[in-house]
Amino acid sequence: YDGKGELGDPASTEVEAETVDSTRQEITAQPSRGWNERMKIALAWQVVSVLLTGTAVFSQLLADQGVNLPTTQSFINYVVLGLIYGGIMLRRGRRPREVWWKYFAIAVADVEGNFLLVLAYQYTTITSVQLLDCFTIPVVIILSRQFLGVRYSWMHLGGAGLALAGLALLVTADAIMGTKDSGDESASNPILGDILVMIGSTLYGISNVGQEYMVKERDRIEFLAHLGVFGAIISGIQMGILEHEGIKDLFLRGDPVLFAYMLGFGLSLLGMYIFVPILLERSSATFMNLSLLTADFYSLVVALVLFHAKPSFLYFIAFCIIVGGLIIYNLAGDAPASRLSQRPSNFKSKSEEEMSAAINGGVPHSSNGDDEAKSVQDELPQVGV
């Protein structure tokens, strides 16, 4: 039936239906990114890795000066995120596309993960924190497989395993050196510090997988706006309860160097939070955490300069092994996720479409922001049958 009170040609209708089916398959097919594109993404993650190293270095410098304000250090970042992206959300003038409590749950995991990892610097060294926080990787792999339906090939798992082997070599080198030989004696209670890092890494893994889902299935700007607002509320309350005396002492000391360290930490963390969702739209939480393993090596370089560490040659061998694991993981291509939308390589998120429209003075391609993302059927011409 052709919608006009007349019967359509059955043969023609069948051909059109087959055309729609074939087009749908082309749109929903998971494309394989080229090697050049994957390498660009890998290099972009190294920028994030450098920023991560910055947060570690400034946290260690603050800890060495007796400043114990883990929640306060992250609070400023959440406030800035909430102001910037919350303002963009208000300007959009539309309702969120996801229920609030899911964003709140991710914010809790993120805030407490930050809190525990920064707190760990009070009890152990920068090297130990950077090594042990890689426990996030197996957490992310398990959660991605369970909740996102990610199907890893043996090549993916082999690359991840090789990168973790490099990490194990780093841990071995750290154990051989010991804190006294490394010139870093800031570890007052390394066992407690290691436990804090492991718990914090688990929370980070939960946050990373939740973030990957939100930026791919919902909206990056909406996610950052809610993370900023909820993160500021949670960390603000926690800061007022646990750290009010420490904040008072910081202002009484009035040391501009300490405020410079706080600013350096805040800017590094803010840069991470801005870049990570953009890259997660084109990558995955698993590859992100594998790429950030190089932060351990960058931390070592900084430790050589600032903390007068004396590294073993095993560190440099381990770095090469980690990079080799990343290359193997890249060669395996994208790991398909059955519970995430499979998008063509030229796909643009709603965030990108709206930004492009704002720059060009046009209107975003999407017709209604309150609706869910268009399904494949909505994007294809309707055929009367």
Image (cartoon, rainbow, N blue to C red):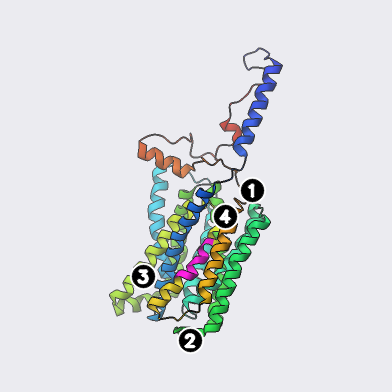
Q: Earlier in the sequence, mark 2 or mark 1?
A: 2
What numbered label is drawn on residue 219?
none
Residue at which label 2 appears: 181
The answer for how far apart the CA atoms under marks 3 and 1 are is 40 Å
Residue at which label 1 appears: 339
Task: Give the percent coordinates (x, y) of residue 334.
Answer: 59, 50
Q: Is residue 281 above or below residue 293?
A: above
Front residue of 115/171: it is: 171
Mark 1: secondary structure: loop
The answer for how far apart the CA atoms under marks 2 and 1 are is 49 Å
Mark 2: secondary structure: helix
The answer for how far apart the CA atoms under marks 3 and 4 are is 36 Å
Residue at which label 3 appears: 262
- Image point 44% across, 55% down: which residue? 275
Q: From the viewer's perspective, is 60 left or right of 159?
A: left
The answer for how far apart the CA atoms under marks 1 and 4 are is 21 Å
Q: Earlier in the sequence, mark 1 or mark 4?
A: 4
Mark 4: secondary structure: helix
Which amino acid, mark 3? Met
Q: Is disc 3 in contact with disc 1, using a CB cutoff of under 8 Å?
A: no
Q: From the viewer's perspective, is 89 left or right of 97?
A: left
Q: Earlier in the sequence, mark 3 or mark 1?
A: 3
Q: Quadrant of residue 62?
A: bottom left
Which amino acid, mark 4? Asn
Residue at which label 4 appears: 330
Task: Give the percent coordinates (x, y) of residue 306.
Answer: 38, 77
Q: Earlier in the sequence, mark 3 or mark 4?
A: 3
The answer for how far apart the CA atoms under marks 2 and 3 are is 29 Å
